[in-house]
Image (cartoon, helix red, strand yellow):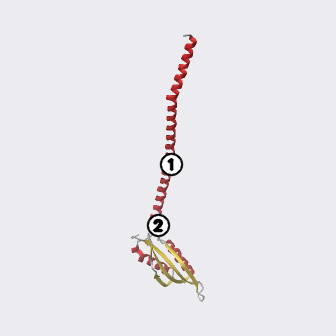
Amino acid sequence: MTGNFRKVVFFLLLVGVAVVGYQYMIKPANARLAESKTRVDEKLTQLAKFQEASNAAEDLSRQLEQLREAMEFFESKLPPKSQIHEVLEQVTVIAQKQGLKPKTIRTLGKKNNSGYIEQPLKMELEGDFGSFYSFLLQLEQLPRIMKIRELELDRHKEDNGVVTADFIVSIFFQNMNG
C-alpha cells in the first residue's frame, strides 16, 4: 500500500464517517430541534392568548367592582320601603315652607321593578312661581332619587305671578324582595 492510496482510503473513511454521522446523528437532531421549536412556538402563542384572557379578566374584574360601587351608591340613595311616609311628609313640608298651597296630593299605583319600587305621586300645588322654583330646588337637595314628570304650569290670569303646578313626582325605594 502506497502512501497516496492510504491517504485516499483515509480520506474516504473520513468522508464516510461524516456522511454516516450526518445521516444518523445530525439530521435526526435537526428534525427534533425543529419539532421542539414548533412546540415552543405553539406554547408561546397559547401563552400570549392566556395573557390576553388574563388581562381581559382583570379589566372585567375592575369594571365589576366599579359597577358594584355604583350600585352601592344608588342603593344608598334609595330609602327602605318602610320610609315612604317620611319622604311623603318631607315633600309636603317643603311645599308648605315655600308657601305653596297643596290642591291635591295623591299616590298613584306603585311600579315594582327588580331592584327598586317607584312610587308616583300626583301633585297639584298653587303659589307664586318663585316659591315653586324654590320647592323644586329643595326637592333636588333631598338625599333621595326622585323624578318629576308630566309637569304642567298654568299662570293665573287674575293674580300676576301665581301659578298652578300639576305634576307627577316619582320617589324610588329599595325593593327588598327583588
Q: What mark, if any, has residue 114 been given in the picture?
A: none
Within 10 Å of the Cα at label 2, are there few (<14), some (14-19), or many (20+) other Cα atoms?
A: few
* Of marks 2 and 1, the one in the foreground: 1
When the figure is inspected, residue 58 is found, relative to residue 97, above or below; the finding is above
When the figure is inspected, residue 22 is found, relative to residue 41, above or below; the finding is above
Residue 79 pos. (x, y %): 42, 71
At a point 49% along the width and 46% down the height, the residue shown is: 46
Which is more toward the observer, 1 or 13? 1
Q: Amino acid at mark 2?
A: Phe
User: From the viewer's perspective, is 86 left or right of 4?
Assistant: left
Q: What mark, if any, has residue 49 been given in the picture?
A: 1
Mark toward the start of the polypeptide (2 vs 1): 1
Number of numbered markers: 2
Cα–Cα span, label 2 and label 1:
37 Å
When the figure is inspected, residue 19 is found, relative to residue 95, above or below; the finding is above
Residue 57 pos. (x, y %): 48, 54
Q: Secondary structure at mark 2?
A: helix
Name which quarter of the figure residue 89 lies in.
Answer: bottom left
Residue 14 pos. (x, y %): 53, 20
Q: Quadrant of the N terminus?
A: top right
Which is more toward the observer, 152 or 39? 39
Q: Secondary structure at mark 1?
A: helix
Q: Among all residues in the image, which is located at the extreme bottom?
A: 158
Within 10 Å of the Cα at label 1, are there few (<14), some (14-19), or many (20+) other Cα atoms?
A: few
User: From the viewer's perspective, is 36 left or right of 178?
Assistant: right
Which is more toward the observer, 161 or 72? 72
Q: Which residue is mark 2?
A: 74
Q: Among all residues in the image, which is located at the extreme top?
A: 2
At a point 53% along the width and 24% down the height, the residue shown is: 18
Q: Quadrant of the C terminus?
A: bottom left
Q: Amino acid at mark 1?
A: Lys
Residue 139 pos. (x, y %): 50, 74
